[in-house]
Amino acid sequence: MSLKGLKSLSIIGLLSVAVASMPAFAGSAQEIRDKKSAEIPVCSKKLGTISVMEPENNWWREADLGSPELLIKTFVRKSNCFTLVERGKGMQALQAERAMAASGDLRGGSNMGKGQMKAADYVLVPDLISSNSRAGGGAVGGLIGGLMGNRKAGALVGGINMKKKTADVVLTVTDVRSSEQVAAVEGHAKKTDLGWGGHGAVFSSSGVGGAGATGYANTEIGQVITLAFLQAYTNLVEQFGALPEDASDAGAQQAVIMNKPGRMYAGPDTNGRVVKTLEIDTMLYPTGQKQDVLWEVTDELGTKGWVSSLLFQLAR
């Protein structure tokens, strides 16, 4: 073979190797990104106490899935980002135990009574985006509604497209103390997202597969919905990193009510100027400033002053 021929062969060979290696490298990079996004985020410290509640509509039944409440609870437990408290169906069993304790049916020393339950800082509700232009005509709402006589529950499922295997979800978080909606984070996933590596751990028996969230690990649409919720949950955790660490301290002070007549002073000194007299049942709002037994408060007219905490109690 001539020198010219050898050079041509070498160039062709090098080009072949380069072209062959490019898809593998690109695929590897994509897999790395997908694997990262498909991992449940893990926190080094708690971001607050949270309860997970079912949405009002039962869209998951129309898609032959379990409640998304169990799915999100799995994310919360494995992420270690929140302290999880039970406020769903398990609460009925808790109340039954407490009822037996109150009636004296439990053994002595059971140490169960009032004032022991941990308060939730936030309530999280997982749901579908009910009206979504991306869903198109093949959405579950249109499909199931036609098959099942336009049932209301079916019509609400607008965030799942059964034909294209896409899901659009939202996680809504409300502050229990202020009733403020502190987050509403959306997530989107499609069938092609299942094609890359790195998702096995999420759907395994140690992930959502063993959490009792029926259908989310072993059905295609369930896996798509899982990835959509996981994307939303990951973004939610990132948002919560900017919120105050102690939600109970950051929240507004609980209102108090006068249970004895008293006086409001201009400063933290009972020998100082009296701003006004206060009658029993007067509602006051602590500002958080305290000095010994004297608290700074405002009344319902906006008047600010100092009152002895021995004269009021928490409003219920």
Image (tube, rainbow, N blue to C red):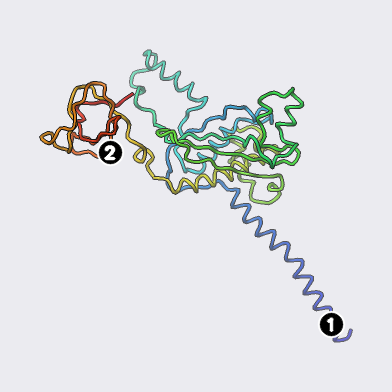
Q: Is residue 111 above or below residue 77?
A: above
Q: Position of residue 106 (x, y in %)?
A: 39, 17
Tell which circle, 2 or 1, labels the residue nearer the N-terminal end: 1
Q: Residue furthest front?
A: 301
Residue 239 spot, x, y in % from top left: 49, 47
**In the current view of this chain or complex, which residue is farthest to the left?**
271
| Mark carried by residue 288 | 2
Q: Which mark is residue 6?
A: 1
* Amino acid at circle 1: Leu
Q: Residues within 10 Å of mark 2 (few under 14, many from 20)?
A: few
x, y percent for residue 314: 29, 27
Residue 121 vs residue 259, the one in the foreground: 259
* CA–CA distance in space, label 2 to label 1: 85 Å
Which residue sits at x=64%, y=46%? 200
Instruction: Answer left or right for 133 relative to 176.
Output: right
> Label 1: how many residues lie within 10 Å, few (<14), some (14-19) or many (20+)?
few
Question: What residue occupies the far right of the structure in this picture?
Answer: 1
Q: Quadrant of the C terminus?
A: top left
* Of labels 2 and 1, the one closer to you: 2
Left or right, 136 with reference to 238: right
Please tell me whether mark 2 sits on a helix, a strand or a loop. Answer: strand
Which quadrant would residue 118 be assigned to in this image? top left
Quadrant of the frame with the N terminus: bottom right
Element class at badge 1? helix
- Picture coordinates of residue 35 (x, y %)? 62, 52
The residue positioned 53% from the left and 37% from the top of the image is 172
* Residue 218 placement: quadrant: top right
Task: Determine the image quadrant of residue 313.
Answer: top left
Residue at image x 57%, y 30%?
A: 55
Amino acid type indicated by mark 2: Gly
What residue do we see at 23% from left, 26% from top? 312
